[in-house]
């Protein structure tokens, strides 16, 4: 009996290790896009990845034909949404400080929808179900985020006094 349990446990560990070897890089990239951190300095993304993989490992035996990557991605997305909800004052609106990553100009909800739809290729219906939003809302958020990335807002103009002082200093 113990030998059988040890054998099952070892097989489970090997299967999970193979899954992590194949999926961790892509999941980390998705988490880095979500957190809008630089790829070489992404502690929040690494924490999201670790929590997602730990959750997937805990449910490994109960997957029963379910794709472990989908399970890990779902947990990653919902965990990010929950943390963003708490971090940004009860909503997925605009961040107080602008993150510096590629998607840093987007609100957390826009990043979440854009990453799921464009990077991960999750269908609108699945994204809507995962986030508890209507399909039309997911479509609108994705369109707005895409437009913002393609046509970023102009930098705000500097005050006139600042401009005159800069010219005087260079003259």
Image (cartoon, rainbow, N blue to C red):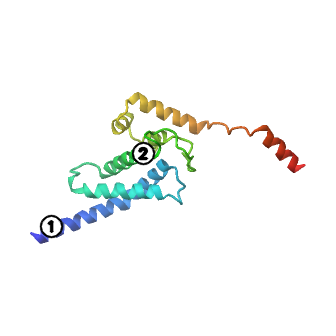
Q: Residue lying furthest bottom in this view?
A: 3
Q: Residue lying furthest right in this view?
A: 171
Nearest the eye: 79 or 160 = 160
Residue in view at x 17 percent, y 68 percent? 7
Instruction: Look at the numbered disc 2 and give the secondary structure of its residue.
Output: helix
Q: Residue lying furthest left in this view?
A: 1
For marks 1 and 2, give the one nearer the viewer: 2
Residue in view at x 48 percent, y 42 percent? 108
Is 98 displayed left or right of 110 in the figure? right
Q: According to the image, label 1 marks what residue?
A: 5
- Sequence-earlier tag: 1 or 2: 1
3D distance between C-alphas at marks 1 and 2: 41 Å
Is 167 displayed left or right of 9 in the figure? right
Q: How many marks?
A: 2
Q: Residues within 10 Å of mark 1 (few under 14, many from 20)?
A: few
Instruction: Look at the numbered disc 1 and give the secondary structure of its residue.
Output: helix
Q: According to the image, label 2 marks what residue?
A: 86
Residue 135 occupies which quadrant of the picture? Answer: top left
The x and y percentages for residue 9 are 20, 66
The x and y percentages for residue 156 are 69, 38
Q: Residues within 10 Å of mark 2 (few under 14, many from 20)?
A: few
Is 11 displayed left or right of 20 in the figure? left
Residue 131 occupies which quadrant of the picture? Answer: top left
Is 57 displayed left or right of 44 in the figure? left
Above or below, 131 against 97 in this view is: above
Above or below, 117 against 83 in this view is: above
The x and y percentages for residue 102 are 56, 48
Residue in view at x 31 percent, y 49 percent? 71
The x and y percentages for residue 21 are 37, 62
């Amino acid at each position: 009996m113990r030998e059988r349990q040890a054998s099952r446990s070892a097989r489970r560990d090997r299967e999970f290790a193979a899954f992590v070897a194949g999926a961790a890089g892509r999941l980390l990239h998705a988490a880095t896009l979500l957190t809008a951190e630089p790829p070489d300095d992404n502690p929040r993304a690494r924490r999201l990845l670790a929590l997602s993989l730990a959750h997937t490992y805990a449910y490994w035996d109960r997957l029963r034909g379910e794709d472990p990557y989908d399970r890990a991605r779902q947990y990653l997305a919902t965990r990010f949404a929950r943390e963003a909800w708490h971090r940004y004052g009860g909503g997925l609106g605009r961040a107080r400080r602008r993150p510096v990553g590629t998607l840093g100009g987007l609100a957390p909800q826009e990043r979440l929808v854009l990453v799921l739809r464009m990077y991960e290729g999750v269908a609108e219906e699945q994204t809507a179900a995962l986030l508890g939003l209507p399909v039309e809302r997911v479509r609108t958020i994705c369109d707005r985020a895409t437009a913002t990335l393609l046509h970023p807002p102009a930098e705000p103009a500097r005050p006139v006094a600042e401009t005159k002082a800069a010219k005087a200093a260079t003259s």
